[in-house]
Each structure stands twice: as structure tokens, then as C-alpha cells.
Image: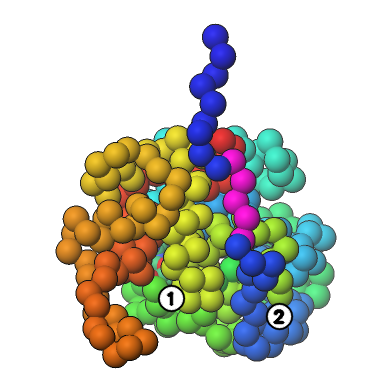
Amino acid sequence: MTAQLNPFRNAFRLPTKQRINWFPGHMNKGMRQIQQKLRNVDCIVEIHDSRIPLAGRNSQFFDTITGSGVKPHILVLNKVDLLGPKQQRSVLQQLRRQQPELKNILFTNCKDQRNHGVLDILPLATRLVGDSSRYNRAQSAEHNIMIIGVPNVGKSSIINVLRNVHLKKRSAARVGAEAGVTRAVGERIKIQEKPAVYMIDTPGILQPSVTDDEMGMKLALVGCLPDHIVGEDLIADYLLYWLNKHRRYEYVEKLSLSSGPSDNISAVLAEYAQTHGMFHRVKQYDGQVEVMTNLLAAARKFIQFFRTGQLGSINLDEHA
Ligand SMILES: Nc1nc2c(ncn2[C@@H]2O[C@H](COP(=O)(O)OP(=O)(O)OP(=O)(O)O)[C@@H](O)[C@H]2O)c(=O)[nH]1
Ligand SMILES: [Mg+2]
């Protein structure tokens, strides 16, 4: 039996030659501050979005920090509520296959009342620090844990959860739905009393220029850079491309599309906007005001469905 051919696009190209690129000054400064503080760090906890377990993680900068293997390293895949339990197992298998050097992987969810997985971070870090040779820090009873990762993956949220639970103290790190909330490496934040454990929050760092277009689109889709940098129309088109390529057609019902799956983002957004009354007034060159379907509002809705898990649980790094 021959496999049925997928009639949709099997590659995604950016419409212009421009690279996806967001590297504001605070990231450059953050990189310097991270390097300066590294000497007094006992363990590095790298937080990433579990919907992109591979994409966007292997930046040169993070490799220089974690790659030497001198300091204990934990990879925390956060927002697992959006990945789903079934996908979790396959993500773990995928990581074990592709990056066998990663020994310490945890899945976490900061939105869950029970803080799924977050409370495992501290015992694991404490054990790894205890097993490591701390060189210049061998005499210190305190543990300093540095939290690193790309923007908007939940670094500050995780610090707050740990502080709330272990110290019963209110949040100390600013959290926000958009990328780039933490803009500098702050003072260390206490998260446990005995033995004293501190965490250092850091700004999310991206590669100065993302050379792999698909990787850039995945980062944009999960919200690691502000939507306007890439454009909601392009993000929505990438989402449609990905869903079709992976035969994930839940969007057809969610968007109430009458004619089934389609690879044409303008047609999809126009139909959704029409059936959901999304219109806006647009002034033409001749001064006339015309009522048109609001494609941007429809694109935002489509992206929001993905980001809130309403298109199903999705690992964007899964092979088609
Ligand atoms: N669904 C879900 N959302 C989460 C989770 N953890 C954090 N968030 C949300 O993700 C957004 C970003 O959280 P932050 O803690 O500010 O992320 P950050 O990595 O510190 O971001 P930057 O400081 O911008 O680099 C916020 O809207 C959080 O509420 C999670 O486990 N699940
Ligand atoms: Mg932050």
C-alpha cells in the first residue's frame, strides 16, 4: 500500500530574504552579566518551552555556558500543560535519541496548582551540586542556581513558584505574557532557607540572527519574540503550514471552515473573519471608507488558539 501524498506545502520559506532577528541591547548586556556572575554559580537550570524541545536551544552562547559540563546542568521543559502528557513521552525519547548527553531533564507547569514538576528542580539541583566539584565555591554552604533560556519560557515564573512554596514569600521576579520582561541579570533571589539556596534570574537571550527560518518561526509561534517583529500574518501562515504538513486538521473545526483543510492562509483567515463578524473600516486613497474583513484580528485568534492548546497538544519539533 502506498502512503497517501500530502497535498500541502512541504517546506516553508520566508517571503523575503530577511532573517528573523530580535536582539535588543538588553540581551547583549545580559550575556555579559551572565558571564560575569558565572564564577559564583553552582548549577545552571536552562528553561525552555516544551512545545519546541529542540528548536532555539542550541545557541552558541548557551553552549559556551552549559557545554563544558563543568557545572551541573538541568534542562527544564516548561509549559507542559500546553504539550500534553502523551507528547511528553515522545519528546523525552526524541531528546534521548538526539542529545544523549542531556542527563537531567524535567517537565514543568507553573500554571498548575500542584506546580507539576517545578518542585523536583531543587532536590535534583541540590543532589547534582553535592556530587560536583565546586572548585572556588567548595567552602560555601550556600547554593547559587542560575536560570537561563530564551525569552518568555517561564524563567521568572519558576523562581516565583519555588520562592512561594519553599519560603512562603511573595513573588520576587517580574513575569509577563510578552517576551523580554526581564531585562537585566538581577540580584540573587532566596528560594530556600536551610541550606540557603538562591536563584539568579536572567533576561531571555536569543541568537543575534536566527539563520534557520523554521527555527525562527517556531520561536515566534510559541511567543519567544514579540509578534510584531515577525508579523502575525506570517506567524499564522507558518502555523497553517505546520498543521497541514503534520496532518493536524483540528483547526478546520475550530475555525469552522466549510471546505476542509486549506493551505491558503488568506482564504482561511477571510472565511473565519466573515463567519465570526470580524470587520473593520478601512479608509481608501480616495477618502471613501470601506468595510473589510479583519484578517489581522483573525490571524491573532488563530495564533491564540494554538497558544492556548485549543488546536490539540503539539510538539513543533516532531517529524512529519
Ligand atoms: N501555560 C503556561 N504558561 C506559563 C507557564 N509558565 C509561565 N507561563 C506564562 O508564560 C509567560 C512568560 O513567563 P515569564 O516567567 O515572564 O517568562 P520569562 O522566561 O521570565 O520571560 P522573559 O523575562 O521575557 O525572558 C507568562 O505569561 C506566564 O504566566 C506554564 O507552565 N504554562
Ligand atoms: Mg523573566
Displayed quadrant of residue 161:
bottom left
The numbered mark, 1 or 2, whose residue comes first in the sequence reads 2
Residue hosting label 1: 178
Residue type for callout 1: Glu
Residue 274 percent coordinates (x, y): 22, 59
Q: Nearer the viewer, residue 246 or 94?
A: 246
Per the picture, the main secondary structure of the magenta-coloured stretch is loop
* Identity of the residue drawn at 54% across and 19% down: 3
Magenta region includes residue 319:
no
Quadrant of the frame with the N terminus: top right
Report if the beta carbon of the residue with label 1 is closer than 8 angstroms to ligand 1.
yes
Rounded to the nearest angstrom, the CA distance separating label 1 from label 2 is 20 Å
Magenta region includes residue 13:
yes
Residue 129 percent coordinates (x, y): 67, 61
* Identity of the residue drawn at 34% across and 57% down: 269
Q: Please tell me whether mark 1 sits on a helix, a strand or a loop.
A: loop
Q: Is residue 101 above or below residue 210?
A: above
The quadrant where ligand 1 appears is bottom left
The numbered dot on residue 31 is 2
